[in-house]
Amino acid sequence: MEKKNEFKPYIPADKIVPEFTVTSIVIGIILAVVFGAANAYLGLIVGMTVSASIPAAVISMGIIRVILRKDSILENNLVQTIGSAGESVAAGAIFTLPALFIWAEEGKIAFPSMMTIFLVALFGGVLGICFMVPLRQALIVEEHGTLPFPEGTACAEVLLAGEEGGAKAGTVFAGLGIAAAYKFIADGFKLFPSEIGYAFKSYAGSQIGIQVLPALAGVGFICGPKISSYMLAGGTLSWFVLMPAIALFGADATIFPGTAPISELLAANGPSALWSNYIKYIGAGAVATGGMISLIKSFPLIVRTFKQAMSSMSKKRSNTTLVRTQQDLPMPILLVVLLVIVVAIWLIPAFPVSPLGSLIIVIFGFFFATVSSRMVGLIGSSNNPVSGMAIATLIIATLALKATGTTGTKGMVGAIAIGGIICVIAAIAEDTSQDLKTGFIVGATPKKQQIGELIGVIVSAAAIGGVLYLLNEAWSYGSKELPAAQATMMKMLVEGIMNAELPWGLILIGVFIAIVVEIIKVPVMPFAVGMYLPFSLSAGIMAGGAVRFLVEKIKGTDEEKKARTDKGVLFTSGLIAGEGITGILLAGFAVAKLDVALKFSLPQVGSLIIFIALLGGLFALCMKAKPAKK
């Protein structure tokens, strides 16, 4: 007998409606590729990705409900399930795999093959889903009402308010179109500079500036004023304290890893030379420490989480005649898939591990998948310490490979490949858990959602290699255009452990700055990422955060404020997707050597006026939003 009568999903278990259809699969695949590419571009620039679930659900409702004249909430749910997998695969891949490209550019290794990238993303994605399937009953069903799963619940609310789908989808598409046009005019035609700045000659080493791009404003609006201000604070410390101090005390000295006197570096390339030679190492130390601090702080919760999940799984019902809303992929199939992947990791040369090492990867992956999926249920995706998990795995993997004699470039490549798999596992596990929570509320069939996740992973894994190659060919990872903060930091860690090549003095400065920031109770990760990235980037994000601050502070009822914020989130999700897609397109133009730049461009003040107009438009759009009629 089914014991669970407390919660009634929107679509009852005994009702069959269209769900796993050709329409939902095709739209989901397209959105998985689009949001995966857009988030890869965004993450490599700003060091973070944004959830694709709600934009995917809204676009799906706009297409299925308005254009195709169909009415199926479960089809829309499957679209966002498949579509959001692209963003998660991208997040896991871009935080680790660009390290391989940087080593290849330095001549240390050959460029990674498309097959290697595909297998890292595929194995990580499939393992993340396989691990989440047996946890669904424990975390989603039995903990309903205890674990809020903020993003999954919010996505369900959007789907349940589906009658507004057309209008909401229009908001996303409007943002997408505006950002695409803006980006193409700024960085394609180069009608106005997308970054403006001024170096203070009387305060050597410092430089103020802002990148006037829609995606940055979008990230700032979605993250909110607090997170944006922490990033700006980190950038302020780097560009107005540390860099001027290096310029002042270094003067004509040559300090490792720089190869020329500091005064010459400043004269030749300006303050950015200090960032590339010194600050990125300090920032990397802070980012790594921030990840580890978040992991250590979460450790009691991690242990409790794992115990509760294992306990709940052991009590899982043996009843074989489950209703539609309780059907999962069969465990025998999942165990066969796990066994195949364990053997494949052992046999494939890209992963230089023994059979025991392959098994350890899977065990680590299961542990972090369990932790990740429960923690997003408690605190949401944005607070989940995935980077800390990846850093811990990377350090352990590098030490283990070195101890077993796998050293040099082979060991470094192996450590990054292993870290990449774990990173994708954690990212996909959290995405799958949020999607299954959405499905639980709306009454989806879990088995069909899990198959949808697998489809999204396979398609995204196949596409991510091409995206990574295209972006590297256009601008190179670790450059000003593509800082690739996390991947660069992971590369430094692996090199430091394997070869003792790192400027540990600079890294330890970053470590202790992060510790001080933690002591004064400021969130370390956004502050550390702000330290690592150019100040102009943090300033662009802060501009979006300032608009969110105004929208939330202006008088109105709670319903009115929520309507304003929701509209802004949808519009800025479109801004991020539009700029990401156009960025990929411009990368293709750069590789093909197609120059579309105009012969003239506006001065810097023109860029500032256009960006302020964009921010003003975002503010006006939010203020026009009205609460939905009940």
Image (tube, rainbow, N blue to C red):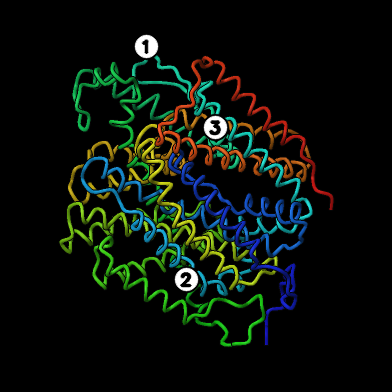
Q: 620 left or right of 176?
A: right
Left/right placement of residue 441 relative to residue 408 reads right
Cα–Cα span, label 3 and label 1: 26 Å
> Which residue extends farthest right?
630
Sequence order check, earlier mark of 3 and 2: 2
Q: Earlier in the sequence, mark 3 or mark 1?
A: 1
| Residue 268 vertical position relative to residue 417 in the rendered view, above or below | above
Considering the numbered disc 1 on the image, is that residue within a helix, a strand or a loop? loop
Q: Residue at x 57, y 17 (%)?
A: 606
Q: Which residue is mark 3?
A: 542
Residue carrying label 1: 202
User: In which quadrant is the N terminus drawn?
Assistant: bottom right
What amino acid is found at the position of numbered circle 2 in the picture? Cys
Tell me if residue 299 can be seen: no
- The label on residue 422 is none
Residue at coordinates 44% horizontally, 57% vertically from top-left? 462
Marks 1,2: beta carbons within 8 A? no
Above/below status of 11 relative to 350: below
Query: How far separated are the C-alphas under marks 3 and 2?
Result: 39 Å
Residue 391, horizontal then vertical, whole percent: 35, 53
- Crowding near the residue tagged with mark 3, few <14, some 14–19, many ≥20 C-alpha atoms within 10 Å: many
Residue 253 placement (x, y as % from top left): 19, 21
Residue 76: which quarter of the image? bottom right
